[in-house]
């Protein structure tokens, strides 16, 4: 079975076969970037308050990681030109107001949220449960993109891998200025 067929089959499974009223309500909210803005602001302020100059550098590195993941995803879209399923799949359940006019591969939502999740998971890895929560959160947002009809599974998988890589690179940049001191910012 070709990769495209597997991707389409998985898309229809998530978008159609998994359909239920709870996910129909949650997924459009979860994938909306405006849903998370208050959390980002509160989290950023908490980081600044608790870590001061280290926190400012942490936020700069998070911003760089997300910017790189977002722009890298846009560059890949420019070369791949994969249409979104909401344009090509006749039986798509589109649960958002419109089908974006940008291309589909890779998912910026997945890339950006995985960049943030991986960066914070590495910085705060001594809090053992936090990486699981952050990566599950990013995965739910990414899967929501498929559920609402905007992306194929391969789009979010590639976006997640791209974002994870950029999150790791942002963490490496963070540790250049803030070398390991056996604290929450240590790299191993």
Image (spheres, rainbow, N blue to C red):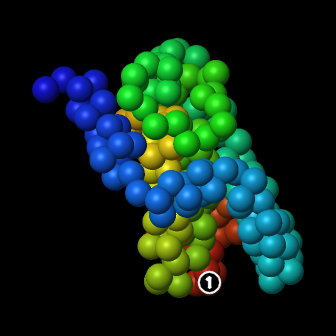
Query: In this picture, is 94 found above or below 117?
Result: above
Q: Is residue 133 left or right of residue 8?
A: right
Q: Is residue 129 left or right of residue 68?
A: left
Where is residue 129 drawn, in percent x and y?
47, 82
* SS state under label 1: loop
Q: Residue at x 51, y 43 (%)?
A: 148
Q: Is residue 142 above or below residue 186?
A: above
Estimate how packed mark 1 is, as few (under 14), some (14 to 19) or many (20 or more) residues with alpha carbons within 10 Å: few
Q: Tell me where residue 182 sits by quadrant.
A: bottom right
The residue depicted at 51 percent of the width and 15 percent of the height is 81
Residue that appears at 74% across and 68% down = 39
Q: Is residue 163 visible?
A: no
> Would you name the residue on which mark 1 appears?
183
Return the residue nearer the eye: 83 or 176. 83
Q: Looking at the picture, how far across and down is residue 73, in whole percent? A: 57, 32
- Please tell me which residue lies in front, 125 or 187: 125
Q: Is residue 131 above or below residue 9?
A: below
Q: Is residue 130 left or right of residue 120?
A: left
**Considering the image in quadrants, where does the N terminus appear?**
top left
Instruction: Where is residue 145? Give x, y as percent.
Output: 51, 44
Tally of numbered discs: 1
Residue 84 locus on image (x, y percent): 49, 25
């Amino acid at each position: 079975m070709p990769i495209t067929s597997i991707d389409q089959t998985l898309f229809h499974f998530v978008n159609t076969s998994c359909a239920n009223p709870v996910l129909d309500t949650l997924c459009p909210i979860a994938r909306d970037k405006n849903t998370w803005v208050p959390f980002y602001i509160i989290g950023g302020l908490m980081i600044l308050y608790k870590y001061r100059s280290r926190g400012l550098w942490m936020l700069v590195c998070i911003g760089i990681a997300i910017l790189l993941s977002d722009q890298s995803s846009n560059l890949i879209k420019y070369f791949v030109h994969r249409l979104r399923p909401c344009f090509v799949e006749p039986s798509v359940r589109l649960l958002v107001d419109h089908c974006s006019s940008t291309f589909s591969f890779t998912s910026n939502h997945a890339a950006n949220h995985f960049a943030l999740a991986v960066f914070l998971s590495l910085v705060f890895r001594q809090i053992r449960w936090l990486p699981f929560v952050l990566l599950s959160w990013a995965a739910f947002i990414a899967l929501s993109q498929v559920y609402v009809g905007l992306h194929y599974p391969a789009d979010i998988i590639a976006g997640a891998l791209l974002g994870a890589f950029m999150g790791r690179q942002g963490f490496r940049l963070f540790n250049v200025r803030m070398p390991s001191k056996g604290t929450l910012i240590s790299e191993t």
